[in-house]
Amino acid sequence: MPAAEAPHLEAPNFEAANLSVLAYAQGFTLWHYRAPEMRLGTVATAGFLEPAAEMLAPGDMVLVSAGDGGRVLYVTRHGQSVATAPLS
């Protein structure tokens, strides 16, 4: 019996329609990014969320649902660029 193949996951492309607000209070926003065709590590890569830089603020959190798992990212800034770090 052949081994099951891993699902094919696409190359990284940020899609604004996949980013949505779950909650907002006192200047903090909890976001959700749905990326079923991507690897989790791709969404967590530096610069991936850069197209959303005007919406994301330092201290925000992004719940990521990817094709190979989920993660909570903490939004930081590196100069004018958006950066994220895993929530630990």
Image (tube, rainbow, N blue to C red):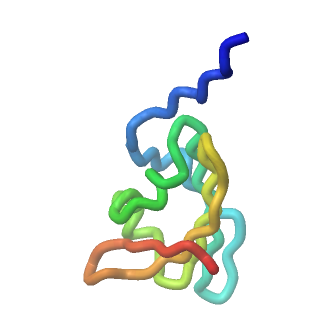
Q: Which of 2 and 17 is in front in this view?
A: 2
| View extreme (left): residue | 79
The residue at the point 55 percent across, 47 percent down is: 18
In this rendering, the answer to whether 14 lies above or below 60 is above
The residue lying at 30 percent from left, 73 percent from top is 81
* Towards the viewer: 33 or 6: 6
User: Furthest-top residue in view?
Assistant: 1
* Quarter of the image where the C terminus is located: bottom right
Residue 74's x, y, as percent?
55, 76
Against 19, is 3 above or below? above
Q: In which quarter of the image is residue 15?
A: top left
In-image side of 86 versus 15 (left or right):
right
Residue shown at 59% from the left, 28% from the top = 7
**In the rendered view, would you say 70 is above or below 7?**
below
Q: Residue, x 61% and y 77% (percent of image)?
A: 87
Residue 46 falls left or right of residue 59? left
Q: In the figure, is residue 38 to the left or right of 45?
A: right
Give the image location of residue 28, x and y in percent.
61, 82
Quarter of the image containing the N terminus? top right
Residue 27 quadrant: bottom right
Tally of numbered tags: 0
Residue 65, position as x, y percentages in the image: 64, 51
Q: Which residue lies furthest to the front in this view?
A: 1
Picture coordinates of residue 82 (x, y %)? Answer: 37, 72
